[in-house]
Amino acid sequence: HSGSYSLDILWSGEPIAQSPFRVQVIPSGDADKVFLQMEPLQNCVLGRSVSTVVDARKAGGGELTAEFLGPSKPARCELKDNGDGTYSLTLKSNETGRHTLCVRFNGEHISEGPFTVPVSSLPDASKIRVFGSGIEHGILSTFDSTFYVDTTGAGAGQLAVRIKGPKGGFHVEMEREKKQDRVIVCKYDPQELGDYYIEVKWAGEHVPGSPFMVVIFDTHQELERYLSGSVVNPMPPVPPFFPPGWVGPPPMGLPIPPPIPSPQPPLGSAPTSVLATMPPALPYALPAPSPYFPSRVH
């Protein structure tokens, strides 16, 4: 039982010096009242130290120990007493994969222990794969905006998705795929026809293919025309401009118009000679008309 006790020690029937001794017996500590902060351990990176706190203030007296076990060998694990009932725990591993963290109080696992801690390599956005109907052209009435981001092999990082449409930004729903925790399911809700730009970044870097452009049409025929490359420019062709009195080849950058037949001299008349002159080239040229305007639906 816990409490205060008196300890008598005798030698040949006589008490030794300072006997009896006062002994205070405290209750055994409760491992279920020791708690570990897991949030800092969610993004452990290969070769980098990560620290967290173990709180044993309500557990009573006892000894706290910890060990960090990797897939093939133990990893570095340091426990420091802060002197206020809390402990600083520092972990570092030199191999990737799922690690097991065992924190014990008086030989027993603490609350919710043992713990699984994933250790990943450095972030690599080039390993991200994005796929699904949400990054493909479609028809508004039947459009499925779902797409998937597979982060397998990309290391530790944060996924950021930003979508811009005809009327500004969009809210994006993201959640982990139930069967594969490295696959993120994304979804948005387009309401207008037009162009949508989808940026997907991993640890601040664009993933392959980002930003993705998605064009949403009104009808299946419009979609087919766009996919076949037969989109017709709705704007009339721009006629070439020739300065007044221009003679000879057109300025650089202008299409050459078909030749205009010159009037033939009457039969029997003397031949005439014409001197073709061209003023210095103008410092400009008209650009060719654009075959497609992405802000319009064709």
Image: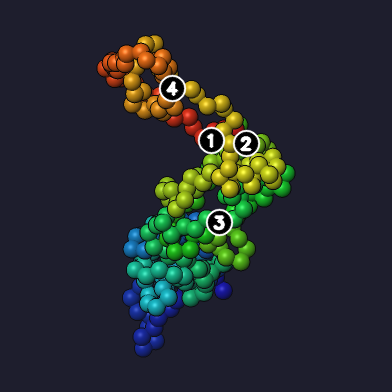
Return the mark for residue 298.
2
Secondary element at tag 4? loop
| Residue 105 x/y as whole percent | 48, 70
In 3D space, how far apart are the residues under numbered discs 1 and 3 (Cα atoms)?
26 Å
Dot 4 corresponds to which residue?
261
N-term mark: 1 or 2: 1
Image position of 254 with respect to 26: above or below = above
Numbered circles on residues, count: 4
- Closer to viewer: mark 2 or mark 4: 4
Secondary element at tag 1? loop
**Circles 2 and 4: CB distance less than 8 Å?**
no
| Residue 234 x/y as whole percent | 59, 30
Q: Which kind of residue does numbered mark 1 sit on?
A: Tyr
Image position of 56 with respect to 268: above or below = below
N-term mark: 2 or 3: 3
For the residue carrying disc 3, how many other residues have a C-alpha within 10 Å: few (<14), some (14-19), or many (20+)? few
Q: Image quadrant of residue 73? A: bottom left
Q: Which kind of residue does numbered mark 4 sit on?
A: Pro
Residue lying at 62% horizontally and 36% vertically, measured from the top left: 298
Front residue (pair 17, 223): 223
Dot 3 corresponds to which residue?
131
